[in-house]
Image (cartoon, rainbow, N blue to C red):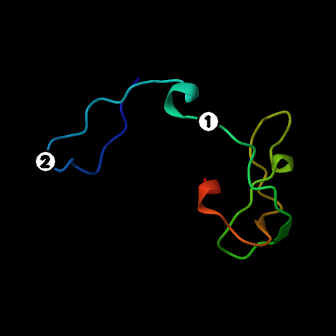
Amino acid sequence: MKNPEIRFKQNNGEEYPDWKLTSFGEACTGFEYGMNSASTQFDGENKYIRITDIDENSHRYLNDNIVSPLGKKDDKYIV
């Protein structure tokens, strides 16, 4: 696997070490469902990705009806 081009240096000026292929479970400590909020018209800034926005066949994001979450936004749900 080819490493992506790194644009920043570490504090000591050296390049970042090689990237390592890892599983999602090794990289994360847990997984929770999400925000569970109603949606509203897109506010121009906050996109709200719902399970219905993923095509069942291709598994691709469908961006033909972009919406925003209604109510308070919580940073822990930012993708």
Q: Is residue 31 left or right of residue 66?
A: left
Q: Considering only vertical position in the picture, is 7 above or below 65? A: above
Q: Is residue 8 left or right of residue 24?
A: left
Q: Quadrant of the N terminus?
A: top left
- Residue that appears at 80% across and 71% down: 70
Q: Residues within 10 Å of mark 1 (few under 14, many from 20)?
A: few
Q: Residue furthest bottom?
A: 43
Task: Classify mark 1: helix, strand or loop.
Answer: loop
Q: Residues within 10 Å of mark 2 (few under 14, many from 20)?
A: few
Where residue 21 appears, as percent x and y from the top left, is 44, 24
Report, in whole angstroms, how far the alpha carbon at label 1 lies from the one at label 2: 33 Å
Task: Classify mark 2: helix, strand or loop.
Answer: loop
The image's mark for residue 75 is none
Circle 1 residue = 30
Q: Is residue 43 left or right of residue 25?
A: right
Amino acid found under the numbered disc labelled 2: Gly
Q: Considering only vertical position in the picture, is 28 above or below 23? A: below
Q: Considering only vertical position in the picture, is 36 above or below 29? A: below
The reply to whether the C-beta atoms of the residues labelled 1 and 2 are less than 8 Å apart is no
Comparing marks 1 and 2, which lies closer to the viewer?
Answer: 1
- Residue that appears at 72% across and 71% down: 72
Where residue 15 appears, as percent x and y from the top left, is 20, 40
Where residue 43 appears, as percent x and y from the top left, is 73, 76
Front one among 63 and 51? 51
Amino acid found under the numbered disc labelled 1: Gly
The image's mark for residue 13 is 2
- Residue that appears at 26% across and 51% down: 8
Front one among 1 and 29? 29
Q: Is residue 4 left or right of residue 38?
A: left
